[in-house]
Image (cartoon, rainbow, N blue to C red):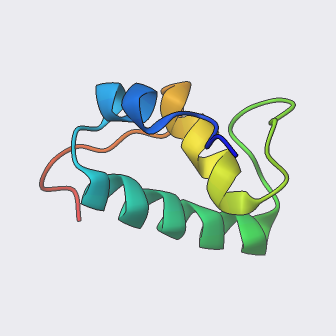
């Protein structure tokens, strides 16, 4: 089973795997509460997958020191 979007494509947007995990988990919890997505017609049915799609489409970004 392939992870979609791929980790290589995601690391082109955010270099740190740790940051990818924490950012996508935080965003997934937010989506679970609000049901609002930053992208139209996500491919994933799970919140973490949708968060990763948002990162890939550059709708969800991270600035170092933004914690």
In the rendered image, residue 22, in percent from the top left (x then y), is placed at: 38, 66
Residue 45 in the image: state x and y as whole percent: 85, 53
Which residue is at the far front? 1
User: Residue, x 74% and y 46% (percent of image)?
Assistant: 37
16 and 23: which is toward the camera: 16
Indicate whether 58 appears above or below 43. above
* Quadrant of residue 34 within the rendered picture: bottom right
In the image, is residue 59 above or below residue 32? above
Percent from the top left, x then y, of residue 66? 21, 56
Q: In the rendered view, would you say 28 is above or below 10? A: below
Q: Is residue 12 above or below residue 62?
A: above
- Left or right of 59: which side holds 37? right
* Quadrant location, the C terminus: bottom left
Labels in figure, total: 0
Q: Residue at x 50, y 58 (%)?
A: 24
Q: Which quarter of the figure has residue 7?
A: top left
Residue 5 in picture, x, y percent from top left? 59, 34
- Left of 55 or right of it: where is 61? left
Name which residue lies at 49% across and 40% down: 60
């Amino acid at each position: 089973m392939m992870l979609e979007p791929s980790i290589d494509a995601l690391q082109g947007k955010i270099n740190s795997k740790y940051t990818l995990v924490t950012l996508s988990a935080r965003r997934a919890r937010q989506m679970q509460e609000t049901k609002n997505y930053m992208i139209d017609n996500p491919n994933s049915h799970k919140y973490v997958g949708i968060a990763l799609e948002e990162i890939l489409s550059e709708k969800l970004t991270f600035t170092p020191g933004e914690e």
